[in-house]
């Protein structure tokens, strides 16, 4: 369980913004709202990169921050993955070195290969990051944060430089990653449609406070019937007395694993 209650003055001309969140393992939280309201500052306070005027952060009963009792856990002790708006890649390293810098051993070679394939960065591994396009840098920055397997993953406008096709692949990977590792994720973005595709709870930073905008209810899996047709390479889904036929995206053989994600809109 992560409990966050913060007051932070964003600038000299604005009153303090109040941020209050409570979420747990496996949650994906989205935050949207106008520029200049403090969304990035909020993430940096969670990471310990920016001071807070007043408040506390508790992670699994461990205090990371408590201004009343002068508790402050340094960023290196929080083990937070952070995807920055400006990517924050190490310019003296190539792509592979950037990724390996953060990688935990439990994220093995097979998983790394899958990640590099999905993000389409295998051909870039030997390149210095200053030779990459904005979209390539963003994919490397996301990959570096994922292989860290952090306590919390913070993502600040993480898809802004990605084209539609790559963005869909990256979002799909992050959803599966979250299901496997149950790492809580907080995402800031102006593009609310990105949040609806990925998050289960969305907040808007409005009038200097976080307001709940949308929360998905868990979808019951009862009554769902699946049938895979190897000859036609399709999958039939029956749910609530309705049938859907879904074409498979690759050549599926007997014994292969198929992952199906169903969400409410």
Image (cartoon, helix red, strand yellow):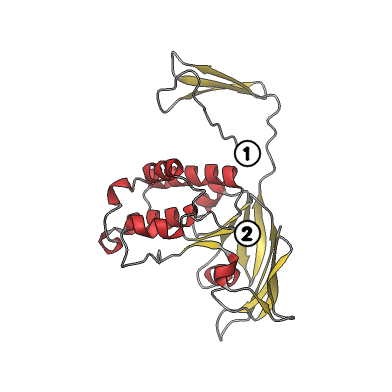
Q: Helix or strand or loop: what does disc 2 sit on?
A: strand
Is the residue 104 above or below the residue 235 in the image?
A: below
Q: Which mark is residue 144?
A: none
Q: Is residue 18 visible?
A: yes
Q: Would residue 262 be found to the left or right of residue 147 on screen?
A: right
Q: Residue at x 59, y 82 (%)?
A: 14
Please tell me in which quadrant of the rendered image residue 78 appears.
bottom right
Viewer-proximal residue among 187 and 256 = 256
Quarter of the view holding residue 64: bottom right
- In the image, 165 versus 79, the foreground residue is 79
Q: Which residue is mark 1?
A: 264
Residue in the picture at 47% in, 52% down: 147
| Apparent side of residue 79 relative to residue 157 in the rendered image (left or right) | right
Q: Residue furthest top?
A: 231
Q: Disc 2 marks which residue?
A: 203
Give the number of marks. Answer: 2
């Amino acid at each position: 369980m992560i409990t966050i209650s913060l007051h932070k003055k964003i600038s000299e001309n604005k009153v303090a913004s109040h941020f209050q969140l409570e979420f747990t393992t496996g949650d994906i939280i989205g935050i949207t709202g106008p520029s200049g309201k403090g969304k990035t500052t909020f993430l940096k306070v969670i990471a310990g990169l920016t001071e807070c005027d007043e408040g506390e952060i508790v992670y699994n009963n461990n205090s990371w921050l408590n201004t009343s009792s002068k508790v402050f856990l340094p960023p290196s002790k929080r083990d937070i993955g952070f995807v920055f708006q400006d990517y924050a890649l190490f310019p003296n390293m190539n792509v592979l070195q950037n990724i390996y810098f953060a990688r935990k051993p439990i994220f093995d070679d097979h998983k790394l290969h899958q990640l590099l394939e999905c993000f389409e960065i295998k051909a870039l591994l030997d390149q210095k990051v200053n030779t990459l396009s904005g979209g390539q840098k963003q994919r490397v920055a996301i990959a570096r944060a994922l292989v860290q397997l952090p306590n919390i993953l913070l993502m600040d406008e993480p898809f802004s430089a990605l084209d539609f096709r790559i963005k869909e692949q990256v979002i799909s990977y992050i959803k599966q990653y979250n299901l496997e590792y149950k790492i809580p994720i907080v995402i800031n973005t102006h593009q609310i449609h990105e949040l609806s595709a990925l998050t289960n709870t969305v907040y808007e930073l409005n009038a200097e406070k976080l307001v709940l905008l949308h929360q998905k209810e868990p979808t019951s899996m009862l009554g769902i019937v699946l049938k895979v047709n190897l000859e036609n390479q399709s999958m039939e889904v029956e749910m609530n007395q309705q049938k859907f036929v879904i074409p498979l995206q690759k050549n599926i053989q007997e014994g292969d694993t198929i992952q199906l994600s169903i969400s409410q809109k």
